[in-house]
Image (cartoon, grey):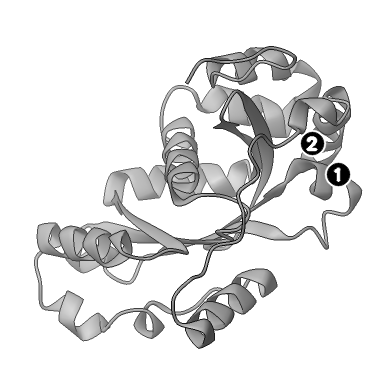
Amino acid sequence: MAVVVLGRIARSFGGAGLALAAWPRHRTLGSPSRALSNLAALALGVSRRLGEIVKLELLEAESGPVVKKVWEEYHAESEAACGVTVDAAQYAMLMERLKDSPMFIAPVRRGEGFFVLAMQHKEQSLCLTFLEEFKKSPETATPWVFATLYDDLLESKGLALLRADFMPHLITKEEVAKTLSQLLTTYTSDRYDRIWIFNHAPKFFKVDEYLDECGCTVGSKKDE
């Protein structure tokens, strides 16, 4: 049902409303071999185990606040990934609601325009793709952002770790960070009713109203 409403939303923009403003040029990612490895994994939508990203035993020896600081600082220097932490209560609510409502849209402002990503949840991952591409083929749409939630330290440290790998030639790190923050807030606050309606009663989902809430209005320019 949510796939149907995503298609309807995409059609309502007529393509022009989703035009990307100031499309960024491809940037060099540093080490070619590492960059190719990261992008290949992202393109395939592959979740890596936490132990493949960091030395898990070192995090296990630290307190929750230190783990949070280390995780965020570790990703601060990355050009193709960002990381945030989610506390235990927020994580429990997030996972419950993702399971119940696994799809939504994520409007992203860029310059004086905006574009929309389609979000899908499965198991511990979130995959965000360009809405127009998703409309044409949900199965083959290219992941722009592929995020994984890690609960390895949930019991011992009271927090979950979220890592989002992204295509830097398609979307910026700042845009990814804002999108993740917006999704986490919407899923774990009283604004969740928008997501529930989108998944369970799509004919009542007010697209333009939600876009306006996010600072995006079809056919009009928005100030930065």
The residue under the point 38% across, 77% down is 50
At 60% from the left and 77% from the top, the residue drawn is 41
Residue 206 visible (yes or no) = no
Secondary structure under the numbered disc 2 in the rendered image: helix
- Going by the numbered disc 1, the residue's amino acid type is Lys
Q: Amino acid at mark 2?
A: Leu
Whether pointer 2 and pointer 1 mark residues with C-beta atoms closer than 8 Å, the reply is yes
Q: Within 10 Å of the Cα at label 1, are there few (<14), some (14-19), or many (20+) other Cα atoms? A: many
Q: Quadrant of the N terminus?
A: top right
Query: 221 and 5: which one is in front?
Result: 221
- Residue shown at 55%/59% (left/top)? 168
Quarter-of-image position of residue 94? top left
Q: Is residue 124 left or right of residue 84?
A: right
Q: Which mark is residue 111?
A: none
Question: Where is residue 6 shown, x and y percent of the image?
Answer: 79, 36
Image coords of residue 201 (percent x, y): 75, 25
Q: Residue 23 location in percent, x, y?
A: 65, 44
Q: Earlier in the sequence, mark 2 or mark 1?
A: 2
* Numbered tag placed on residue 135 in the rendering: 1
Binning the other alpha carbons within 10 Å of mark 2 as few (below 14), some (14 to 19) or many (20 upward) gives: many
The structure residue drawn at horizontal position 44% and vertical position 76%, both measured from the top left corner, is 30
Give the mark count. Answer: 2
Q: Quadrant of residue 76?
A: bottom left
Question: Is 162 drawn above or below residue 99 in the view shown?
Answer: below
Q: Which residue is mark 2?
A: 6
Query: Mark 2 and mark 1: span between their CA atoms?
Result: 7 Å
- Report the side of 146 relative to 142 (left or right): left
Image coords of residue 66 (percent x, y)? 11, 63
